[in-house]
Image (cartoon, rainbow, N blue to C red):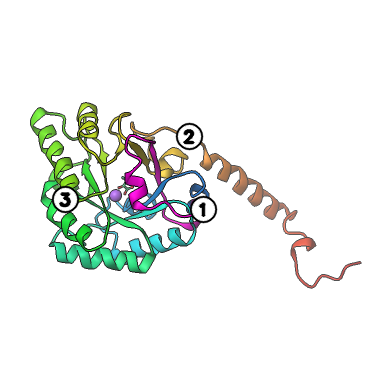
Amino acid sequence: AKRITVPQLRAYKNQKKIVSLTSYTAPFARVLDEYLDMILIGDSTAMVGYNMENTLAITLEQMAAHARAVVRSTQNVCVVVDMPFGSYQESPEQAFRNAAFLLKESGADAVKYEGGTPLAATTRFLVDRGIPVLAHIGLMPQYLNTMGGFKAQGMSDEAAEIIYQDALSQEQAGAFAVVIEGTAEPLARRITQALSIPTIGIGASPECDGQILVAEDIFNLTPNRIPKFARQFSDVQAAIREGVAAYATEVREGTFPTLDHCFGVKKK
Ligand code: KIV
Ligand code: NA
């Protein structure tokens, strides 16, 4: 099987749903690869993988290393890597340089970054130079300090209009799809109907052309309660607990390891 390309994903619009999760490391990526269309190396790894307060401090080098691990461990999915805070906002040139670094270091297919109309010129610059862009609008966690917290966006008509324009600007600028995070449902629905590129929702609308979630959020691997926009699809934490409890018991009781697990043991 050949890896799903960016133009193929874009052509899912009105054909089939784009099914996507985040993944940061090989063990997850290897499994998810068999079921998904797209994997995102999200900068959410700052919080989910490194237990940081927010996503702001993760570095370009860290994102590149995670992306490399995921690309090496997959062969089917389209791989998109998040550009971390501060690596693209300054100018289209800065964004291109750092996006190229990420793609060269990792072999990922595309980059994603947060921003609507203000980042449209950057998207045009990258796409014209060979770097596909997945836009991310609505709730943008890297804007935490200007937003004053994580809260649903586009709840007033005025706010919704700005986000609607963000979507149009990014489509116009050449983004191949748009992630819509944490917005009023009617807004996400309206954007999905208006755009000719796919929308990928997270806390957006069932009408979106695709869905993305943080894998840990649906496998019971986060310490926090499950966000409103997610659901527990399996309990990996319970499976790990069962395994680690059994292992600890056997090591303490001396039933593991046995000579079967040792080298140079004379067979009797
Ligand atoms: O970093 C991330 O995980 C994301 C997705 C949730 C869209 O940006
Ligand atoms: Na992100």
Quadrant including the C terminus: bottom right
Q: Nearer the viewer, residue 59 or 108?
A: 108
Q: From mark 3 to mark 2, how far is it between C-alphas?
A: 36 Å
Q: Which residues are magenta?
A: 1-28
Name the amino acid type tagged 2. Answer: Phe
Q: Mark 2 Cα within 10 Å, few/some/many (few <14, many 20+)?
A: few
Q: Position of residue 250 (x, y in %)?
A: 70, 51
Q: Secondary structure at mark 3?
A: helix
Q: From where the camera sits, is residue 65 visible?
A: yes
Q: Looking at the image, is 168 positioned above or below residue 118?
A: above
Q: Nearer the viewer, mark 3 or mark 2?
A: 3
Residue pictured at 82% horizontal, 70% vertical: 265
Residue plotted at (33% across, 50% down): 7
Q: Are marks 1 and 3 in contact (CB under 8 Å)?
A: no
Residue where numbered disc 2 is placed: 233
Find disc 1 in the rendering and name its residue: 1
Residue 159 occupies quadrant: top left
Residue 150: x, y in percent? 22, 40
Q: Is mark 1 within 8 Å of ligand 1?
A: no
